Image (cartoon, grey):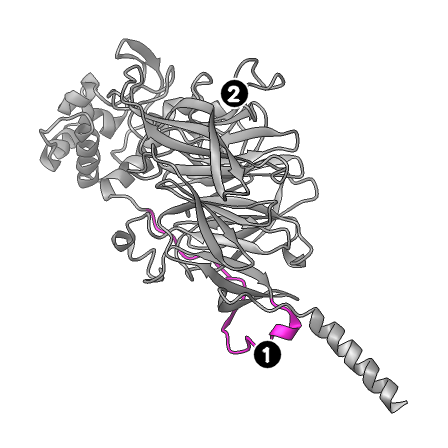
């Protein structure tokens, strides 16, 4: 009997040990996240990346990621080997957000090993495109398809899907995703020209929808158009979950957003930012068929990569959107309602642990991989914001996975963190003069003084801006009635700021406005005070 019990004990022990999976030697444990009932281990699996942007989990059970300068990499998680499968040569990656950006793998990658990428380039032959300053714009972007060779571990057979997309040194977005009906969606920024976002015939500032070969689907909202939704400033997150499309988008100094993307939806930029909660915005909310965001941040935290978690591995995170943030340096989780059209609750993790977080993906096992973004930004310039950025090993890939009971003893010395109670306090990154303009003028005259067609006159290059006395009087006392600016007539009321702004504030504000129209003769507080005391001329 004793011998039988001994044999049974050995069998049971071996069965238990066979379920124990050792961590790969390349995983470097950093700390533990304690949820309600689940412990998570946060580890580092890759470091020393150069300006990474996208990270994708492939159905080939490998990790795919990009660097903005052109590299596409594939990681074997059984041994930690990282191989560069392609280094695209014609990429332009100068400025803020051009380069190799969005990437997505074909849903049936094992049988159809296609990969789609979006990147910016220079077309020096193009002379028919102007930027917001009226200069020739040579920047373009395109979507390319490649085929992965399993034998050679490289990408081959490049094919253009959509080319000659207007781009710029900033506001290129972008993210790619493929829907269940095999339609490719591309979220694009406004290419630093806000007019693009409200012009249906222009590709920037939109979510585009296309077949995988680049042709236009017959069931698109507008026949013979890639257009799916509009009014986007600079979306950097896109995910399809439960038949719905979600995006995250950068605002200016206010109103970063999470949006539920709908066909023919208009998300407001530049006329409406965030919710429809300002007097000047209400007119456009009705006329634009405006769609409010699911969530909005002010001050901004720069939301980037977006994914959806619904794996049983982490029960507390099921049915949550996962959001990485750059300025916020954190991972945000948003619980969705059953219908997926409302956010019920939020949670914040990893705050100020690894610096800026660019993107993330979820593996077939329910592990979460996060890629950081500290090598592409002027960290020393914003020390108050990035005071905890790691000084070595940037950039890196982190792995968040369940810590099993049998591992607790091994990692008992690691520091444990819980959910952050509050987000780190954000401040607006603007000069005093720009803040004055944004707080008092931008909601009507727009961020660059371009105005709103048929409603609010432009400021840039107008006779009023050139006439110092007229400009001071208008800002102090306001104006009403019909006026003509650059050949267009306007008839609305502009409030005066004599009660709300001091002479010094008005001086700073007006010199900022006139500086954008190349006027070098500054306005003084003495000139403002003289007109204030004199009052409005009849």
- Quarter of the image holding residue 292? top right
Asked whether residue 299 is in view, the answer is no
Residue 420 among magenta residues: yes
Residue under label 1, please give it: 409
Asked whether residue 372 is in view, the answer is yes
Give the answer, above or below, for where 360 lies relative to 384. Answer: above
Residue under label 2, please give it: 226
Compared across the picture, whether 356 is left or right of 521 comes to right
For the point 38% across and 36% down, the residue is 88
For the point 62% across and 37% down, the residue is 107
Q: Position of residue 521 (x, y in %)?
A: 9, 29
Q: Quadrant of the N terminus?
A: bottom right
Relative depth, front residue between 173 and 114 = 114
Disc tally is 2
The answer to whether mark 2 and mark 1 are in CB contact below 8 A is no
Q: For the stretch drawn in magenta, what is the main secondary structure? A: loop
Residue 168 among magenta residues: no
Q: Residues within 10 Å of mark 1 (few under 14, many from 20)?
A: few
The region drawn magenta spans: 403-428
Relative depth, front residue between 435 and 260 = 260
Q: Position of residue 435 (x, y in %)?
A: 29, 40
Q: Position of residue 429 (x, y in %)?
A: 31, 46
Relative depth, front residue between 186 and 526 = 186
Extreme top residue here? 487
Relative depth, front residue between 483 and 70 = 70
Q: Position of residue 480 (x, y in %)?
A: 31, 18
Tell me how far mark 2 sits from mark 1, CA to CA.
55 Å
Q: Secondary structure at mark 1?
A: loop
Q: Quadrant of the C terminus?
A: top left
């Amino acid at each position: 009997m004793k011998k039988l019990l001994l044999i049974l004990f050995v069998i049971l022990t071996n069965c238990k040990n066979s379920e124990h999976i050792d961590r790969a030697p390349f995983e470097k444990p950093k700390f533990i996240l304690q949820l309600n009932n689940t412990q998570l281990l946060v580890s580092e699996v890759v470091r020393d990346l150069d300006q990474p942007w996208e990270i994708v989990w492939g159905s080939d059970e490998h990790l795919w990621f990009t660097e903005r300068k052109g590299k596409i990499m594939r990681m074997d998680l059984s041994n930690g080997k990282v191989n560069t499968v392609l280094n695209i040569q014609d990429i332009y990656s100068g400025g803020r957000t051009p380069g190799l950006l969005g990437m997505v793998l074909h849903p049936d990658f094992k049988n159809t090993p296609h990969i789609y990428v979006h990147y910016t380039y220079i077309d020096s032959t193009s002379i028919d495109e102007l930027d917001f300053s009226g200069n020739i714009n040579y920047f373009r972007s395109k979507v390319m398809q490649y085929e992965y060779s399993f034998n050679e571990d490289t990408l081959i057979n490049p094919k253009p899907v959509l080319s000659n997309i207007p781009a710029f040194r900033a506001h290129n977005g972008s993210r790619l995703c493929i829907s269940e009906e095999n339609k490719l969606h591309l979220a694009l920024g406004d290419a630093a020209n806000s007019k693009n976002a409200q012009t249906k015939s222009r590709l920037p500032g939109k979510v585009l929808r296309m077949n995988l070969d680049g042709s236009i689907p017959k069931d698109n909202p507008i026949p013979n158009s890639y257009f799916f939704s509009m009014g986007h400033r600079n979306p950097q997150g896109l995910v399809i979950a439960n038949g719905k499309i979600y995006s995250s988008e950068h605002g200016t100094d206010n109103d970063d957003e999470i949006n539920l993307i709908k066909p023919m939806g208009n998300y407001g930029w530049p006329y409406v930012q965030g919710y429809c909660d300002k007097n000047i915005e209400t007119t456009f909310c009705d006329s634009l068929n405006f769609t409010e965001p699911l969530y909005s941040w002010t001050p901004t935290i720069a939301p980037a990569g977006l994914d959806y978690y619904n794996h049983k591995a982490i029960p507390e995170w099921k049915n949550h959107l996962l959001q990485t943030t750059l300025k916020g340096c954190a991972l945000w989780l948003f619980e969705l309602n059953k219908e997926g059209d409302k956010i019920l609750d939020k949670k914040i993790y990893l705050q100020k642990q690894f610096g800026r977080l660019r993107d993330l993906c979820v593996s077939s096992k329910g592990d979460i991989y996060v890629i950081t973004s500290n090598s592409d930004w002027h960290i020393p310039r914003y020390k108050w914001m990035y005071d905890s950025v790691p000084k070595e090993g940037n950039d890196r890939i982190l792995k968040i996975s369940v810590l099993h009971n049998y591992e607790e003893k091994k990692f008992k010395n690691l520091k444990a963190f819980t959910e952050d109670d509050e987000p780190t306090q954000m401040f607006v990154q603007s000069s005093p003069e720009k803040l004055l303009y944004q707080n008092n003028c931008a909601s009507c005259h727009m961020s660059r003084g371009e105005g709103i067609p048929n409603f609010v006159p432009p400021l840039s290059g107008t006779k009023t801006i050139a006439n110092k006395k007229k400009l001071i009087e208008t800002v102090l006392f306001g104006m009403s009635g019909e006026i003509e600016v650059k050949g267009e007539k306007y008839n609305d009321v502009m409030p005066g700021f004599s009660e709300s702004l001091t002479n010094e504030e008005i001086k700073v504000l007006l010199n900022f406005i006139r500086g954008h129209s190349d006027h070098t003769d500054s306005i003084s507080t003495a000139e403002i005070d003289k007109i204030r005391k004199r009052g409005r001329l009849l």
